[in-house]
Every structure is written in C-alpha cells, then in structure tokens.
Image (cartoon, helix red, strand yellow):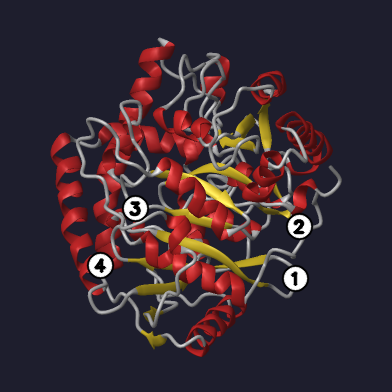
C-alpha cells in the first residue's frame, strides 16, 4: 500500500471492512515503515512482528479499528509475554516481562487493532523528552535534531512519521500533550478515571496519571475513547459520566463557548514570541468562529500548587519502584538507573507518611480553586509548550544535572501539569507551525469530565484550520 499513511485509523478500518485490503497487508505496510524509518527516528524499541502477523491472521474483534496497526508505549501498560523495559537498564537487565495483558490493553485489543511493538520512553517516564540511556533518543520526524517530546515520545514519533495512524501513550504531567505538540498530533489527556485503571494500574493511585492515544485526526481519538472509556467493574472510583458517544459529539456544533486564554506561566517568565503569536492567532480564530474569547489567566499560587505535588509524587515513585524491586528480587545497581532517576528514588524514600498525606491533602484543596474558575468559562486556552520543541540533548537526563533539568522544564513545559493535579480533560491540537517548520500545539482544557466540549471544539477547529495534509520530512 503506497498510500497507507494517507489514511487515519478509521479510514484503514473502512478499507478492511470493504474487503479492499486485509489486516495482514496493513500489518506488512506498517512493518515496512518501521524498518524504513526507525533507524532515523528510533521510535520502536520492541518489535513483535511475529505476534502481529499471527494476530492479523485473525480472527479479530469487530471493533472500529479492525485490522489497524497499533503500537504501545513501553511504560505501565502490560502486554502478555512482552518485555516492559520502562526505558531503564534495571528492567532490561532483569528481563522484566509481563505475564498478562493490562485491562486497558484488553480494551485496545477489543477495538480490533493489531499491535506491532512497543515504543521508546524516558526512564520511568520522568522527563518531557524521550532520551533514555538504554535505547537512546527518539528524534522528531519534523526535524531530526529536535526532541519528539516525552514521555510518550516514541509513540508520537511513530504516528507523526506515518508508521501507525494512532498509538498508546500516558500523561502524568503532560506526557501525551507534550509529544503531541512536538510532533503535530491530536493528544487528549482524559479525565481522571475515564479510562480504566483496573487492578493492575497501581501508578494511578496518586491521581495524576491517565492513559489514552495520540492520533492524526480528531475522529480517531473519539472512536478509541468510546471503546476504552467505559465503567470498570469493581472500581473504587465513580466513572466520569458522559451523555453520548464521542463519535456523535464530533458531529455537533460546540455552540458559542466562553473561552478564557492566557500565556501566564508558573515562574512568571514570558514564552517565546513565536508561541505567543500563535496563541493570539488562535484566540482571534476562536472569536471569528463566534466564541466569546476573554484574556484571563488562572491567577493561582503556582508555587504552592507545585509544592503540594512534590512529596506525595516522590513517595508514589518510590512505592512503584518497590514493586519492581519485589518482582525482580534485588535493588538496582549504581549504573542501572540514570542520575535523575536516582535523585527521584532517594528523595521519594526520604518522604515520611505524614509529609506524603499532607502534600496530597494540599493538592486536593488547592485544586478546588482551579476547578472553581471553570464555573465562569467553558474552556481554557494556552499553548502546550513555552518554546518550540527543544533540541536533542537540551533536557537529556544523562548529561544535564537534575536541578538544571528542573529549571529547563519550567521554560519548556509551563502549562500542562496543573490539569493533571485537578484531573480535568485537556487536549493538544496542532494548529500552527513555526517559521523553522516545527509544529506548535495549542492546549484546550475543559471542566471536569467534559471531554464532549473538547471534542466538539476540536472537530470545529480541525475543519477550519486543517492539519491533515502537513507532512514531516520523515513520512510514509
């Protein structure tokens, strides 16, 4: 299929349904593109071609993506019989392998996808770039000298290069939205507990982390969330309600929304002028479309909010590492974790139970102030990044000191994290391009559990400001 990459996931599934192509042929098309592009972008770190070919031979579930090639991020999500490196030499040396599928992985399979492998991620997903010492950097298909973002950078690069039309990712502090913005994709961070945690999802306990997909089209994002975002049996949390399928929402007008917008950053520093100009152009487009658009920041105590996050997030990381250690049967050796990871683990182990719970209480109470602001507007608009995608090496955790990485993170990623704290849905849309040819993502955040508004607005913007025909240098 020479034109394989021209189709989104639903487009490929339609070809399968009409008998114009088989799942096996789509699988071979995707494999050919991995072999063609992976030497340049380093997106796929575990190739499971034999498994994919057997899966494509069927029978496959009659889901909306029947026969469509798919890849999963090598972090959190369990795939039976496959290694889970988590970007770490520690797991790689221990040959850490999962015995069964995650509950969410079972839902992906029910959509009909054929899974070809696993994608690169920074060690334990800690950084906003994908440059692990274990596998090396994933490079941006738009410019190989730049980062694809993180921590879902391998998946984002695979979709952007046309290897697969959609891929799994996870978002704890922006790790879907950041790589989506870097690579010119649609990246939705869903409402907390929208997608199932299921009994194997221990890292969801702190409430920051969600998993979902990155796509090239809004409709692929809506269709997959209709499959995965359904109530989980025996869940300890109430499943966020929705009125109807998201595939129906994208056909509806968003109406006249009240949209606040801002480039307010936590450290008070201005963003790059090119990003500011793109933000202002987006606000003007929204106003032209009939929305009420008002310049208004969150005006919150960012220092207090981020401070409230620190202790319990550190303790949560240490607790997650304890689970790896229990399964592997030994502590990591000195050379098996990167400097930033060692700093996070040692810091997390120093947190007392009192400090962790106090921090969690503080974050919950401070989040109420953010959520209350959304009583006065429907959507909050910011950029995703404060700059264009960083050069490879700029926040490499193997060469840059942990404290300096923290400073540079504030420069690069000032916008996504608060909405992980509050649990709200937040989407990156590839509305603009920089003068140097790199994508610029805009971030839209809605009220808790209101993905419907985001889908309606995203579909409107996709029509008014289409991005489907933009192509990176590494493509097809």
Task: Give the residue pinned by disc 4.
Answer: 370
- Residue depicted at x 45% and y 74%: 253
Whether residue 136 is visible here, answered yes or no, is: no
Task: Give the residue pinned by disc 1.
Answer: 436
Instruction: Tell me residue 428's x, y (percent).
Output: 51, 62
Whether label 2 touches label 3, CB < 8 Å: no
Whether label 4 touches label 3, CB < 8 Å: no
Disc 2 packing (10 Å; few <14; some 14–19; many ≥20): some
Give the mark, 2 or 3, whose residue is nearer the N terminus. 2
Which disc is residue 191 wearing? 3
- Residue depicted at x 15% and y 50%: 361
In the depicted structure, whether residue 229 falls above or below residue 387: above
Whether label 1 touches label 2, CB < 8 Å: yes
Give the mark, 1 or 4, whose residue is nearer the N terminus. 4
Quadrant of the rendered image containing residue 330: top left
Whether label 2 touches label 4, CB < 8 Å: no
In the depicted structure, whether residue 420 falls above or below residue 258: above
Give the mark, 4 or 3, whose residue is nearer the N terminus. 3
The mark closer to the camera, 2 or 3, is 3
For label 3, the SS is: loop
For label 2, the SS is: strand
Give the mark, 1 or 2, whose residue is nearer the N terminus. 2
Residue sticking out furthest to the front: 18
Instruction: Tell me residue 91's x, y (percent).
Output: 52, 21
For label 1, the SS is: loop
| Alpha carbons under labels 2 and 4: distance apart | 36 Å
The mark closer to the camera, 4 or 3, is 3
- Residue depicted at x 19% and y 54%: 364
Instruction: Tell me residue 269's x, y (percent).
Output: 45, 75
Whether residue 10 is visible here, answered yes or no, is: yes
Task: Give the residue pinned by disc 2.
Answer: 143
In the depicted structure, whether residue 214 falls above or below residue 124: below
């Amino acid at each position: 299929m020479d034109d394989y990459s021209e189709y989104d996931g639903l487009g490929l599934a339609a070809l399968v349904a009409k008998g114009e192509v088989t799942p096996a042929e789509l699988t071979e098309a995707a494999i050919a593109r991995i072999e063609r592009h992976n030497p340049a972008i380093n997106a796929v770190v575990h190739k499971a071609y034999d498994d994919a070919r057997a899966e494509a031979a069927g029978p496959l579930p009659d889901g909306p993506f029947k026969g469509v090639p798919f890849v999963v991020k090598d972090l959190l999500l369990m795939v039976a019989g496959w290694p889970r490196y988590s970007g770490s030499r520690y797991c790689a040396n221990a040959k850490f392998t999962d015995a069964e599928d995650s509950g969410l992985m079972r839902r992906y399979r029910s959509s009909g996808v054929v899974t070809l492998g696993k994608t690169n991620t920074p060690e334990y997903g800690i950084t906003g770039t994908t440059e692990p010492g274990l596998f090396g950097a994933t490079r941006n298909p738009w410019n190989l000298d730049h980062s694809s973002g993180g921590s879902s950078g391998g998946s984002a690069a695979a979709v952007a290069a046309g290897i697969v039309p959609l891929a799994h990712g996870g978002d704890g502090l922006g790790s879907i939205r950041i790589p989506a913005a870097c690579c010119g994709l649609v990246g939705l961070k869903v409402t907390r507990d929208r997608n199932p945690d299921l009994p194997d999802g221990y890292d969801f306990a702190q409430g920051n982390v969600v998993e979902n997909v990155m796509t090239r089209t809004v409709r692929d994002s809506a269709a997959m969330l209709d499959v995965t975002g359904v109530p989980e049996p025996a869940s300890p949390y109430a499943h966020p309600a929705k009125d109807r399928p998201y595939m129906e929402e994208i056909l509806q007008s968003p109406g006249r929304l009240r949209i606040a917008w801002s480039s307010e950053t936590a450290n008070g520093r201005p963003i790059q002028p090119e990003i500011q100009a793109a933000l202002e152009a987006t606000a003007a487009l929204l106003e032209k479309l009939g929305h009420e658009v008002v310049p208004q920041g969150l005006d919150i105590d960012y220092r207090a909010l981020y401070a409230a996050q620190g202790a319990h997030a550190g303790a949560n990381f240490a607790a997650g590492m304890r689970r790896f250690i229990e399964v592997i049967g030994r502590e990591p050796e000195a050379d098996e974790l990167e400097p930033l990871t060692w700093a996070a683990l040692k810091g997390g182990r120093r947190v007392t139970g009192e400090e962790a719970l106090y921090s969690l209480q503080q974050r919950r109470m401070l989040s109420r102030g953010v959520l209350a602001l959304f009583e006065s507007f429907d959507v909050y608009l910011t950029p995703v990044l404060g700059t264009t995608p960083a050069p490879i090496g700029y926040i490499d955790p193997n060469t840059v000191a942990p404290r300096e990485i923290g400073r540079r993170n504030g420069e690069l990623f000032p916008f996504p994290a608060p909405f992980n704290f509050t649990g709200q849905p937040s989407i990156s849309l590839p509305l603009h391009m920089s003068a140097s040819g790199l994508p610029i993502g805009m971030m839209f955040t809605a009220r808790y559990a209101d993905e419907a508004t985001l889908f309606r607005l995203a579909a409107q913007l996709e029509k008014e400001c289409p991005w489907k025909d933009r192509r990176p240098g590494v493509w097809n």
